[in-house]
Image (tube, rainbow, N blue to C red):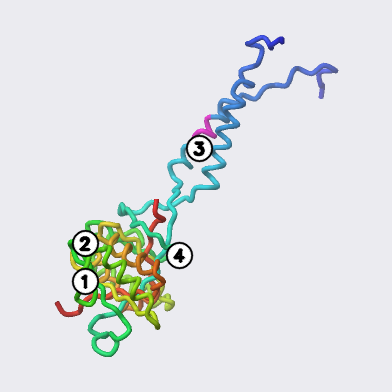
Amino acid sequence: MRLLKPGKKSAAENVLPLINVVFLLLIFFMLAGALEKAELLEITPPETASSGQPDDTTALLLIAADGRLSFRDEILARADVVGRLKAYFAAHPDGRLKLKADAQSDAAMVIALIEELRAVGLKELGLLATGAS
Amino acid sequence: MRFSAGRRRPTAEISLTPLIDVVFILLIFFMLASSFLDWRAIGLKTAKLGNMAGAASEGSVLVKLRADGDYLVSGERMSRAGFADRLQALAGRAPKPRIVVEAETGVPVQALVRTVDMAAEQGLTDVTLASRSEP
């Protein structure tokens, strides 16, 4: 069997497989990964076995493990959060809100906050979690 | 305009290096920026325990999460395994009771989510969060 003499291929031909693989990886990450906006607070979401899919509600309240709250790219005190959401619910009477709370944040505080928000117009709450690994 | 007649030069080569550079940069950007988290949403309701006192509490079971990981179901303390058994028993009731979950200070949200999951596993999907209005 005669093999091609090495060194005959041009430099461009040699990198073609590399380019192919890199293109494939690029296309995979473009299609499979969801681009997400960076958030102010670092949050490790709780894990759940539930299969409910998040809806398209845009209002997202973040609760960090240390209890800090963030809404719409601002870190806010609790009273301010309630004030902002009151205004938000006044404009959006469907009263839907997504809540992203850290797995280690205090549940009693989260429940109390949800209740406070319910008083200012919260109707449907979706607590965000990730699928169990 | 004059074209070189007949035999053309063996294709003027476009250098691939800039292309590869750009593709690599795009690849790294998408690798770092994309997220593969599998998001789920848990629908939750809330109620003030004060409003639910008395009549409203019939047909609902109050579950209190203790900071030490135990559960208080209608005032009775039990471990997680005991709570799972209790949920199974509750699921047999008709109509299915509403589960009212209350948390002590210091209970992580993960424990709350786990409780909701355990109830849902038994078909008890009517889960309400509650906090005590009075201490």
Dividing the picture into quadrants, the one containing residue B97 is: bottom left
Give residue B96's position: percent from left, percent from top: 38, 79
Q: Residue furthest left?
A: B135
Q: Determine the secondary structure under disc 4.
A: loop
Identify the main secondary structure in magenta: helix
State the image quarter where residue A107 is shown. Answer: bottom left
**Marker disc for residue B69:** 2
Q: Is residue A19 above or below residue A63?
A: above
Q: In which quarter of the image is residue B46?
A: bottom left
In whole angstroms, how far apart are the C-alphas of marks 2 and 1? 10 Å
Cα–Cα gap, marks 1 and 4: 27 Å
Whether pointer 3 and pointer 2 mark residues with C-beta atoms closer than 8 Å, the reply is no
The amino acid type found where label 3 is placed reads Leu
Q: In which quarter of the image is the N terminus of chain B?
A: top right
Q: Mark 2 lies on which chain?
A: B
| The residue stretch that appears in magenta | B21-25
Name the residue located 74 percent from the left edge and 18 percent from the top edge: B10
Badge 2, how many Cα within 10 Å: few under 14, some, many 20+? few
Determine which residue is flagged by label 4: A52
